[in-house]
Amino acid sequence: MSAGRSNAYWAANRYADEAAEPAATAPLTDLPAAAAARFGALRAGLLGLAGVAESVRFMGTTWRWAWEYGVGNRKLCWVHVVGKALSATFTMTDAEEDRLSRAGRVPAEITRAIAEGQRTGPLKWCWLALDDRRAVDGFIRLAARKAEWLAERPTPHRMPRLRTPRRTGSEAEDSE
């Protein structure tokens, strides 16, 4: 999923070699100071969310290496280091998009990323440039909401009925 970016954009991934897995902290030393600071803040903010785990994964010939964040087996977002810049890809369901719209003010760049997202089935794949600290902070707030939603367990529509065990014929005779 290219999330609306060109192949030329993704080809500039700083970590393109499938055989050379970058360390989780590699962007802290490989990026210019301002971008490294944004990566550090982003990583700390995402890992500070309840139940969020990080993995650095090779995501195929388009995305190449990305930092993947999830809650259990559910994906929260992917962070990309392309050239000297950071970006994130995240998915939104219609229900999540509706919840977000009812939650109050959403930063314009996040609203734009969702509006421009590419739909595949029930998901919109949204891409967001993280060019400044304000964008990183706004994205962490969005990720915090999404992490809460991912951690929710679906509740049954009605309570399960308790069943009493059937007694066999011999048990019924013994109780008389």
Image: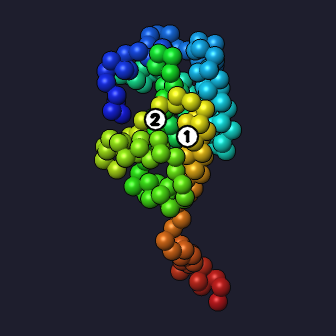
Q: Quadrant of residue 45?
A: top right
| Image: 43 above or below 20 | below
Image side of residue 169 versus residue 28, left or right: left
Q: What residue sits right under mark 2 in the picture?
A: 128
Say what amino acid the circle numbered 2 marks.
Leu
Q: Residues within 10 Å of mark 1 (few under 14, many from 20)?
A: many
Q: Which mark, by number, is residue 139?
A: 1
Cα distance between the residues tagged 1 and 2: 9 Å
Query: Is 26 or 140 nearer to us in this picture?
Result: 140
| Picture coordinates of residue 127, whole percent (x, y) | 42, 35
The front one of 130 and 17 is 130
Q: Element under label 1?
A: helix
Per the image, label 2 sits on a secondary structure element best described as strand
- Residue nearest the viewer, comparing 169 with 132: 132
Asked if the residue under mark 2 is in contact with the one under mark 1, i.e. CB atoms within 8 Å, the reply is yes
Please give the count of numbered marks on the rendered protein: 2
Q: Is residue 125 above or below residue 8?
A: below
The residue at the point 51 percent across, 25 percent down is 86
Residue 4 location, quadrant: top left
Q: Identify the residue at image location x=50%, y=61%.
A: 102
Looking at numbered disc 1 in the image, what kind of residue is underneath it? Phe
Q: Position of residue 158 (x, y in %)?
A: 51, 74
Quadrant where the C terminus lies?
Answer: bottom right
